[in-house]
Amino acid sequence: MKHKWANNLGLKVLSLLVSCLIWLVVTNTNDPESTQVYKNVPITIKNQDTVTNANKTFTVVDGVDKINVYVTARKTVRAALNSGSFTVKADMENYNEALGTVPLEISCEDPRIHQEDIRIIPSSLKINMEDKVEQNFGVAVVTTGKTDKGYELGKTTIVSGDTIRIAGPQSLINIIGKVTISVDITNMNTDSTNFYPIRIEDKNGATLTDSQMSNLELKNSDGVSLQNNSAEVRTEIWKVYNDIPLKVNVSGEVMAGFKVSSITLSPQTINLVASKEGINELGGALTLNDNISVDGLSKSQNYTVDVNDTLSQYDNVRLESDISSAITVYVGIDEVGSKTFQMPISDIIMHNTPDDKKLIFSPADAISVSVKTTDSNENGEINMTLEEITAEIDLKNCEINGSYTLPVEITLPEGYELVNEVTIVVNIEEQDNTTEVEANTED
């Protein structure tokens, strides 16, 4: 007797097969299997100490630190994944010295993904293995910005010392050109101490990349690692002190029958930048180191002195920025019984000044008027003052443009006379609209 389930068996098997086929079609239509790429999955390098313990170091060729992962799976599975679903490791213990590579190992946190479902590109890291070397480099502090008004940068000091040790691959150490620390002093008017990042440039002036920096170890001169590749810098801001008097020492003996009648410095004062301790050390004035010798001289002399030669002996004092360091020292030497006065051009009385003309005098600042006493009992003493001298010139013959050498008429107090005649050169030019000649004129 046949069972009912056996009736139409072939038809039932066919129905089952058709059902399975329909299920496969529906599944492949709504949840198809395909390959999807997950980009920029980071690579973790393991067991780096196996390299450093061998006094070696390595760099990843081309700086590769991320890869792309290709996964073949159903749409519903792929939709649940992202780049963070994968872990990629390069174990340095598996370094292949012959190939110079380390194979990459990948895993997925989703258990539905198997190794055969994953493909990675690249499948290994190309490694450049080198000897590890260490070298000392000087560090320079570079400042940017401008201090508050009335202040200037005094000096900067790297607390841990102005040299650092840098350890890393030989090829990377060889290209290091400059090591600097940048400090912004904008609007500063007080001292400060802070940590600043260390900047390393190659010999072409390009800053090392983060990848290159990660292969270097920075230490202070004692070998202590510098945290975050930074160093502590003390920045001193000094005040500008205006109108500091200048002094100079004169030595030696002039020729017999002559004397030093005057010593004039130009400028007579100078602006200095200093710490409080530095300005106190000066004692209110700066005496130039240069010892002016007048030994055997019989006429006046001009000397040029560089004030920086004097300031170099002070640690906390320097010249204000953008000021010339040249100081002119005029030593007036006259015969005994005579004296030379420097009369400003503006004190000369000018007669018959031509209209609409520009006057250019030489010398441009002052004329020298040398006088002597007519009283033999004066013992060479000149008691008169510059204010007692009158100087005049007549410009009546200077109407045509050109250069004229004119006598200067000097009037002296009773008991004195000129050592020599005084002249002045006047250049006559057309007057422009923006220039005015200030002179004591009397027509």
Image: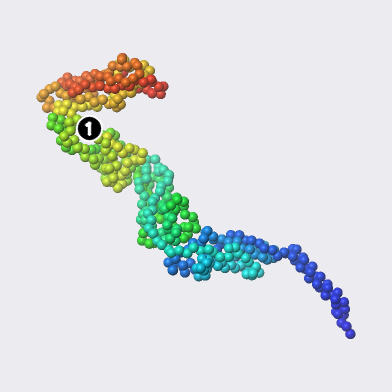
- Name the quadrant containing residue 25: bottom right
Q: From the viewer's perspective, is residue 257 above or below residue 313?
A: above
Determine which quarter of the picture holds residue 431: top left
Q: Nearer the viewer, residue 289 or 298?
A: 298
- Quarter placement of the C terminus: top left
Q: In the rendered image, which residue does mark 1 sit on?
A: 301
- According to the image, what is the colour scheme of the structure? rainbow
Q: Position of residue 405 (x, y in %)?
A: 28, 20
- At 79% from the left and 68% from the top, the residue drawn is 22
109 and 168: which is toward the camera: 168
Q: Residue 216's x, y, as percent?
A: 44, 60
Mark 1, secondary structure of its residue? strand
Q: Residues within 10 Å of mark 1 (few under 14, many from 20)?
A: few
Rendered view: 177 above or below 420? below
Residue 30 falls left or right of residue 157? right
Residue 219 lies, with reference to residue 421, above or below; the image says below
